[in-house]
Image (cartoon, rainbow, N blue to C red):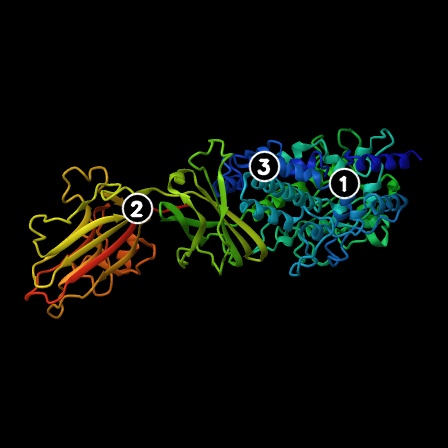
Amino acid sequence: MRRYFTLILCLFLSYSGYVCAYDETYTHQNITLQAAGDPKTGKVSICLKQNLGFEGGLETKLPSNGDRTVLDWLQRGSFDEDQPICRRSNHFHNPLETWSQSYMNDDTSLDGVLIRSYCNVVGWPYSERKSNVTWGTGYLSPNGTPITRYNQDMGWDNARDYYYWALTSISNTGLELFFTKTFRAVGQVLHLLQDVSVPAHVRNDFTSHEVFLGMESLDPIIFLSNRYEHYLQNRSTLIFSLTLDFPSFSNPRITDFWDTEQYNGENPSESLSLGLSEFANANYFSDWTIPNNNPTTKHIFPYPKVNKTNTRICEDYAQNSTEIRKYISRKECPPLTQERKADHFVVISLVNEESIITNENISSLKLSLDENVHDTYAKELLPRAVGYSAGLLNYFFRGEFQVTAVPIFYKNGIQYLRVKIKNMTLNETMKDGEFTVTYSYRPSWGKADASDDIWGQSPVVPSGTLEYGGDDQNPVEDTVIDFWIPEPIPKGSYDSVKFTLAFKGTLGNEVGAVIGKVLTLGEIKFGEEWDNGLNGNYTWAHTDFNLLGQNPANGSTSNIIDGDTLIKDNIRHVGYKTARVNDSFLSTRYNNGQFKGILPIKITRGTYIQFKIDEMSINQIPAAPQGYTNQYQGLWLHFNNGLVLQYTQEGQGIYYTPTTATYIFEPGLIIVDNIYQLFQIAQIPIPAGDMYLEEISFVQQLFPLDNLSDVEHHQHMKIDSIRIIEEKQQ
């Protein structure tokens, strides 16, 4: 009667939020803490810092949700998975059954009936049981299609959704809320994985949770507690003093951490390529599944075996006692010492007559589990529980891409973000997904606490297929995407803008994987929008007058500003044959002081030229001897090493030197090119040493004619903007 009173009390307390007791209050949270690794050096912490901008890694606080850290929320999830108590009925997985039948089904005792009745009525949302792996991941088989689990919003699939929603949130509140739910959900999935390192959870042994641990206490926390789990509650030193056993999967599926379906009941193994439930099922006993003890049909398992071939009887002291007990050992027997060095695989029960306790009778002896056995199991199972948890954490955040960001300007605002993406996830392909860019920035009137920041999102872009690009022997080209910014980001907010690139799609064997990367921008080395009058932002020189006799009285040359556009016209009237030029330039060659501090500009492999010329035309190209030209017009860039870059239109360019790269552009478009790549494409070697831009020139040139002109030659150009910008790889 006392026992059932305790049961009812426990259920009542659990329903009201009390914890009935691996233990969620201590053990699960400590395993998660150890799995996450040191906050300064752990892989997950490094990922949070490098990819997500979480400067504190695992110790980063999420203030809008209780000021808790990322690690706090992972541990909180490890606690919450047992709340309410009826969720626990989904925490079992027998790897020798099909996953649709591998859930716990041995709760047929009176206690089990009472608990099942309670969960069918009070805890009704959890009345339809699922196996642990299905409850955690949604899969009924490794290669199947995930199913919907009623009342499950903290599984692997949910964690990925929350993660994606966090990465694509357009408010700080939403970002922190969904990151909180991400880490909490991951923590709950870690709890589920950790549970399958408990033999009772993988051997259909709910009965072992019904054992009342002594009558010395009515504490409901120790009722419904498996004795092995209870043993670990106050022994955190076992968790924090071990060496982790990481799984050694090759191109894993998410379910492989639980069950790879390699173990079939005939091939026990200690391989780290097995799922955690397979290892625990094949190699360890739970209270009611010891074959020598005549277990019920539901508790019979082929392994482990106790026989005279693979085990022997050894003596050792009971834990914290001088009592000598006999143990079944998988190893040779050491001398009897106070250090208790024997292999405590299972203890021989006192119900056996002393005379029959021999190695010859080892297969028929009644056996049990004591604290020495629990200690042995813990030291062998915990390294995998923690190691597999760490592996699962790393698996969640394993996605990596190298991203190079280049802002593209229009009218003094960022109109596009060009990103070059390289998949750096080791030996895994990204495909069948989508990319999204989200951004935030502080407006000119915004507060330093970011409360006034403006948020936005670019339209979603299909991902295509990105093979692994980290192999230098087989280089893979970057995927280049220009993301449109619906409301251009003002240039004045350039230093505060932050972008987040998110991918959701297939990564390796995982459908629905999510990867995130926070991006910042490189340096603007030069920028001209012609919004500052004819002199511009840099006091340009213009040859719309007779400079050094270049422009005699044979026509007209003009440079005017219309709004924020520089309009250039160079005209030679009918009846003249002398030359005419109109050049707008910045140059170290003609530097009398006005270009100081502007040029030269250092050019690196990540430097881009951006410009927009809306019009470039000539009404009629002057006649010239074959192979020559009598005019040219375009944008020219001159460098310190003798290289020249010419942008022009068909028929309006000129052969200058063998080290001049000439490109035809389309007027009206924003042209964005990497300067180094332009010379590589033109097969012009770039000399060794630093490269500097020494001159920028928008030039119109009409050469002298042999005969008087019988037509007015009119060169016309409308220039919107020009910039030199450094990309940023991250």
Q: Where does the N terminus fall, quadrant-wise?
A: top right
Q: Measured from the top left, where is residue 383 in percent x and y?
A: 63, 42
Residue 242 visible in the displayed image = no
| Element type where label 3 sits in the image | helix
- 434 displayed left or right of 369: left
Residue assigned mark 2 = 529
- 701 displayed left or right of 365: left
Q: Measured from the top left, where is residue 407 in percent x and y?
A: 38, 48
Image height of 621 relative to 146, above or below: below
Distance in Å between CA atoms under marks 2 and 1? 62 Å
Residue assigned mark 3 = 70
| Element type where label 1 sits in the image | loop
Distance in Å between CA atoms under marks 3 and 2? 44 Å
Residue assigned mark 1 = 84
Q: Measured from the top left, where is residue 408 in percent x and y?
A: 37, 50
- Which residue is at the front of the view, 4 or 487? 487
N-term-proximal mark, 2 vs 1 = 1
Q: Which of the two marks, 2 or 1, is nearer to us in this view?
A: 2
